[in-house]
Image (spheres, rainbow, N blue to C red):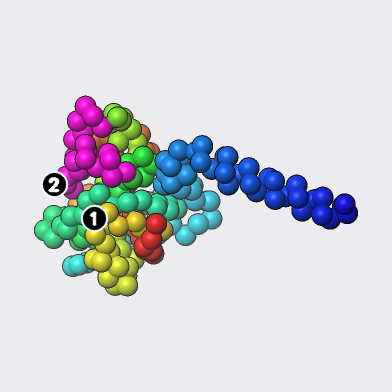
Amino acid sequence: MSKAAYIFIIQMVVIFIIIFKVLPSLDDEEILLISEPLQTQLNNNSDRNISYEGKHQKVNIEKLASYKISAVVKGKKYYFFDPSSEVSPVDLVLAWGKLDSEELDKHIRYSQSSRWYFYRYDCNSQIDGDYVRKNSANVHIIPKDSAVLKKLIQIHKEDYVTLKGYLVSVNFPENKWTSSLSRNDTGNGACEIMYVESITFGD
């Protein structure tokens, strides 16, 4: 047997083991879990300021960190009359990890009101509130332009989306609206405020 033929046989054996032995032993969740958001600190030379054209006035926005999130949409709510709607017309409840599960959806309920996000889960959910808190987020969306806004309007619950942009702080004339930079906080100020430069759909 030639060396080339021997190597080919070895390769086929390895492929056979992977396909018929290794992959079937993996849990589906291990293969299909959506990754955590990717947050990157900006370097000191970054241009952090954005002059944003709000509904009625220009507003200064400061970039805090670059941010990319792939997630399944668990909630969507429009806001038209609160002060934050000057720049942010929509909040999205986004979830990743094990929360992308039809089985868990039977036991968890998500809701939104007044820029807050709430969830309920029953005793059969097999996960606790701490897991839901760390693997979901209520994201206040600031669309970069009309093209991003158009895609934002097209988003529906249970869509898979990837958002790219920045976590930001918004300097309103009356106050400052600052994004959380942690996935572990709760309560007032725990939501992400995201200046979104692009939206893509798909698993």
Q: Nearer the viewer, residue 42 or 72?
A: 72
Q: Position of residue 11 (x, y in %)?
A: 72, 50
Answer whether residue 45 is visible to the viewer in this image.
Answer: yes
Q: To which residue does mark 1 refer?
A: 157
Quarter of the picture holding the C terminus: bottom left
How far apart are labels 2 and 1 at the CA level? 16 Å
Q: In the rendered structure, does residue 121 fall within the stretch colored magenta?
A: yes
What amino acid does circle 2 point to? Ser
* Image quadrant in which you'd find residue 190: top left
Q: How many marks?
A: 2
Q: Residue at x 21, y 33 (%)?
A: 121
What amino acid does circle 1 point to? Lys
Residue 113's disc is 2
Q: Which residues are magenta?
A: 101-125
Where disc 2 sits, the SS reads strand
Q: Position of residue 117 (x, y in %)?
A: 20, 43
Decide: few, some or many residues near mark 2? Use Cα within 10 Å; few <14, some 14-19, many ≥20.
few
Q: Residue at x 30, y 63 (%)?
A: 143
Q: Residue at x 30, y 30 (%)?
A: 127
Residue sitting at the far front: 1
Nearest to N terminus: mark 2 or mark 1? 2
Q: Residue at x 22, y 51 (%)?
A: 75
Would you say 114 lies left or right of 194 here? Answer: left
Q: Nearer the viewer, residue 171 or 180?
A: 180
Would you say 67 lies left or right of 177 here? Answer: right
Where disc 1 sits, the SS reads loop
Q: Is residue 197 above or below residue 171?
A: below
Q: Nearer the viewer, residue 196 or 110?
A: 110
Would you say 76 lies left or right of 49 here? Answer: left
